[in-house]
Image: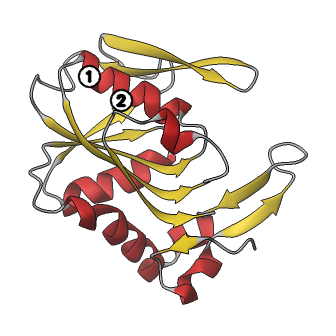
Amino acid sequence: MTTPAHATLPPDMLHLIRDIPDWPKPGILFKDITPLLRNPSGLAMAVEMMANPFRGQKIDLVVGAESRGFIFGTAIAQSLSAGFVPVRKPKKLPHTTHAMEYDLEYGTDRVEMHVDAILPGQRVLLVDDLLATGGTMGACCRLVHKLGGEIVGLTVLIELTFLPGRKSLAGFGDVHSVVRY
């Protein structure tokens, strides 16, 4: 496993994030969180470490990106006594949606949110499992702004600091990451 440059997870829990070389394609070192998710204390600690910086900040809604953002987002919403809003890939939500495109390495992708998911002025925390280039999270932030939400911050379990994710999210709010590689 690659040694993280920074971690707030206890060292004895870092082994719950395993490296999968060459997945989903050659040259990628995938950070697999499924061992952490199946470990009750690891999952609980991750949720607490992601939520704690935002306690007392009157979060109305937690917005989670498909699909692992749903896992952490609902748990963090419950922990902060907030509601949860899913951001999904195209044509997965049943009601009228707003969509936002974002750039991928080779092409574009799109995420959607219900048009009535956020009311103007609601305080929003954005959640995902991993911050790499910031494309998905940036699109989610633009959707929140489009609906009039106030972004309080962004929280992720893992940040890949050698990619421009944090820089690409400048201006959207404070970015908190639990483990940085």
- Marks 2 and 1 in Cβ contact (< 8 Å): yes
Q: CA distance from mark 2 to mark 1?
A: 6 Å
Name the residue: 60% across, 19% down: 109
144 is higher (above) or lower (below) than 29 = above
Q: Residue at x 86, y 42 (%)?
A: 25
The disc placed on residue 145 is 1
Q: Nearer the viewer, residue 145 or 99?
A: 145
Instruction: Give whichever of 34, 100 is nearer the camera.
Output: 100
Q: Is 32 placed above or below 163 here?
A: below
**x, y percentage for residue 147?**
22, 18
Q: Three-letter amino acid code at disc 1?
A: His
Residue at 52% over, 67% down: 179
Q: Quadrant of the C terminus?
A: bottom right
| Along the viewing direction, whichever of 141 and 18 lies nearer the viewer | 141
Asked whether, in this view, residue 139 is left or right of residue 30, the answer is: left
Determine which quarter of the picture holds residue 47.
bottom left
Circle 2: residue type: Cys
Q: Secondary structure at mark 2?
A: helix
Mark 2 nearby-residue class (10 Å; few <14, some 14–19, many ≥20): many
- Dot 1, how many residues are within 10 Å of its Cα: few (below 14), some (14-19), or many (20+)? some
Q: Secondary structure at mark 1?
A: helix
Residue 130: x %, y % from top left = 54, 51
Q: How many marks?
A: 2
- The residue wearing badge 2 is 141
Residue 54 x, y percent position in the rendering:
21, 58
* Left or right: 80 as drawn, with respect to 141: left
Residue 71: % across, % down = 42, 53
In the shown orientation, is residue 105 left or right of residue 124? Answer: right
The residue shown at (42%, 82%) is: 41
Q: Quadrant of residue 36?
A: bottom right
Farthest residue in the right direction?
Answer: 26
Q: Describe the colour scheme in one phrase.
A: secondary structure
